[in-house]
Image: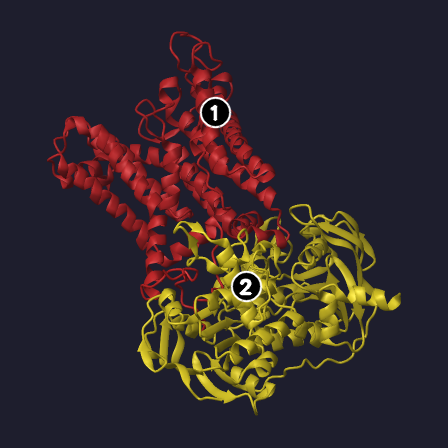
Chain colours: A yellow, B red
Amino acid sequence: MAEELVLEMRGIRKEFPGVVANDDVSFDVRKGEVHALLGENGAGKSTLMTILYGLYKADAGEILLRGKPVVFGSARDAIGAGIGMVHQHFMLIPVMTVAENIVLGMEPSRDAIFLDEKAAESRVRELSEQFGLSVEPSALVSSITVGQEQRVEILKALFRGADILILDEPTAVLTPQEAGELFGIVRSLKADGKSIIFISHKLNEVLEIADRITVLRRGRKIETVPREGATEASLARAMVGREVLLRVEKPPAHAGDVLLSVKDLHVVDERGIPKVRGLSLDVRAGEIVGVAGVDGNGQTELIEAITGLRRIESGTIEVAGKVYGARNPREMLDAGVGHIPEDRQRRGLVLEFTIGENVALHDYSKEPDSKWGWLYPKRMLERAGRLIKEFDVRGGGPETRAGTLSGGNQQKVVVAREVDRDPKVLIAAQPTRGLDVGAIEFLHRRLVGERDEGRAILLISLELDEIFSLSDRILVMYEGEIVGEHTGEVSEQEIGLEMVGAGKKDTEETAA
Amino acid sequence: MSEVASTPEPPEQPQGDATTLASSVAAKQRAGGVIVPVLTAVIAFLIGGLVVLATGHNPLAAYHDIFNGAGLNWIFHPTTDVANTAAYNLSQTLLQTTSLILCGLAVAFAFRCGMFNIGGQGQYFIGLYVANWLGWSFAGMSPLPHVLIAVVCATAAGAAWAGIAGVLKATTGAHEVITTIMLNWIAIWVGEWLFGDGGPLQNSANKTVPISNDIAAGARLPVFWGQQQLQGLHVGFFVAIAALVVFYLILNRTTLGYEVRAVGFNPDAAAYGGISVRKNLIRAMAISGAFAGLAGALDMLGYLYHFGQSDIPVSQVGFLGIAVALLGRNTAVGVGIASLLFGALLFGTTHGLSAGSSSIDPSLAGNLTYIIQGLVVLFVGADVLVLSVWNARKKVRRRGGGSTAARAEAPA
């Protein structure tokens, strides 16, 4: 490979009030290589890239583009210099077509006024064929899949002449198949001489796609290593700064009685569209049942129905043999259902409340937190103090505002609260989303521990890795139904096919 | 997010995104501290001074007159003798403070549940009407039960009036700002009808004036400082002080207050925690209305004694409650201090700057009252705005003066 450096960042330093986000970080990219930027949340990956993209200004250090020093005052400057960025959250306009989105801001025009749609579409088609990014230019963005939206974002960057493409956690929203296709696209871009910066915290995909890997930890560069010779264990150690157990040690499950039983459940969303359609499932004491599925296939509505947050249309929910109407959260909380919500900041915590107040969120109206409507804040704080110790919550005490904690510690507070209520059933929705390796390790071990305590755990996750490493039984959810159940060995590919509805057809075909 | 996290965590992954009205204000207030409301008041007074200067008078003299007019010079010569001018003025300031505290709490309580209660004035009127009606209706009753019945019913009426807005929000999602403003107008026109020609509360002896009967002597609140005929300070003042304590205790020491704050900061998390959001919206609104209704009752039984059509457009205490709550940061202590400030301003400008004072043009005296009041309200209302501009400015600076949004990425 040609060792031509297209980009060099030297001694980058960026300070935010109280935090050094980047401390003397140097980073370079060669022509036609995939350079992965690996690190935990808060390690400074995004800061470094937003500096490169012109959105932040570095306090110190310099950026050299093809050997020449550059200063980007804005994203516009960076784009002009051939740097493109695909953000984690796509910025597309759903009511416009793919082509319109791609040419937005530099539209080919007819008579200097009207958008020349034909020209736009043909240029987009040309570009997408060149790099194997198949997507229909005339389709409305609202009608395409998440994976295709990502391709549109990539095309948008290429259309603006990007030679260096920054992909920020690109696989976070994709199915395994889509991720595989993305890697194909990345390879073809590479073959065409483009350089790709691949931001990730997933070790396996970094090892699969990257030529070189730079690990950041707490704002500092730890190392830059070639893929050859790097292992998941060595990278994890560099990321976290200590040995990490990547696989949860999990003794076999001793499943007991059915504690959660959902039968023929139907739930609709806000717009009245059926989201859960005749779903049935059982979870036994002492087992973790994982529900895999692509986001938006009714997982959220299923969780909300079981926890009483959403009205059920029909069907029954049984907890420990007793049928509940799930009319409101209080009923299900009292029935013994614990819930680690998928969005801890929107739902799991009142960020303005202290840890003590948050820990009391379900039981503030019961003794010992209160009596006859009178609150005993000291007792809340005592309980919080105990749980902070037990769950190793760092960054504050019982009277610290939850909003000041890091994501991992916030999640520990949520889990501590739910577990401390001694629930029979624990619904864990995306329990480690957005957390770093260390916190994931802690929470995974804790979930297995709770399983061994005899709780029935329903795990809903978009991360297949998580489903695989924790579940005793895997269910696959597609369009509001369970389309697959696996207890023994099963491959990610098989699950992946079922997640997009292909598995169902396959089994029907083989059965026929 | 300007606060310093104790764990290394760059701000591009904010863990404390403020989403609701109550939480965003809380976040901004943390950033500003107590300095901001103090600064707000100071700036308002400075600009008010410029207006006085523009009319060719000495602003310091004008403020000195307001200070003395409000009786605040009393602290230099404390005395309980109301023949003393300073003592009398102070008692009048505290009379204003009494209803301002309760109207401020009416706004603050709803605010802590994430709602903006603009309807304090209407709720105050409803309480006032009911207290007036009950005050002269049972003329023979013994004083204590008479006062208690009038106060309790007026408070309940204020609660019910505000509760309408709560129910509408909880059931249909109608925004409380719109509904409470509408309820204000309904309360105003109900008053016009009640006291007007042939209205049910119009004077029964003299049918030619649109004014109510005077309430019975037994229903009048005891005056503890000054004389009843001279509008002395009544015991309602202590009720207002007690209301501040009750407000604090409800919010911080009861499960009810816990629910109110949880819903105010994050209704999604509250619902997840097992708290009924709808119930709390209705209840918080009703409690807000109870404070305003109580204010109306105390004013009626404490010193007004009667009310008429012409009094309706003059009464502003419910609206001033909004400024009191905002300046007082919706806390008990803050509302107490802000009420004293506005009470002094209210009485000090009308009294201290009235004709005869040489410090400003007599024709301007009455108007300057409104100018200064208006400026304070404007600045208090604006300080949330000022804070967000301040924060935005910091954000822009942090980004090196470059593009403020990641989506501004289309080249020319």
Instruction: Report the quarter where the C terminus of chain A lies.
Output: bottom right
Q: Is residue B346 or residue A59 the one in the foreground?
A: A59
Image location of residue A442, percent across then percent down: 61, 76
Which residue is drawn at the image coordinates 55% and 72% (left, top)? A131
Residue B186, label in figure = 1
**Which residue, given by chain and number where applicable, does mark 2 sit on?**
A125
Image location of residue A249, percent across then percent down: 70, 82
Report whether B128 appears left or right of A358. left
Depicted B368 relative to depicted A500: above or below: above
Kindly give the residue lying farthest to the bottom in the view shown. A229
Depicted A93 relative to depicted A253: above or below: above
User: Few, some or many C-alpha atoms within 10 Å of disc 1 (few <14, some 14-19, many ≥20)?
Assistant: few
Real-space Cα distance between discs 1 and 2?
63 Å
The three-letter amino acid code for the residue at tag 2 is: Arg
Report whether A67 appears left or right of A364. left
Q: Secondary structure at mark 1?
A: helix
Depicted B190 relative to depicted A30: above or below: above
Do we see residue A2 in this rendering? yes
Image location of residue B345, percent across then percent down: 27, 37
Instruction: Say if mark 1 contacts mark 2, CB within 8 Å.
Output: no
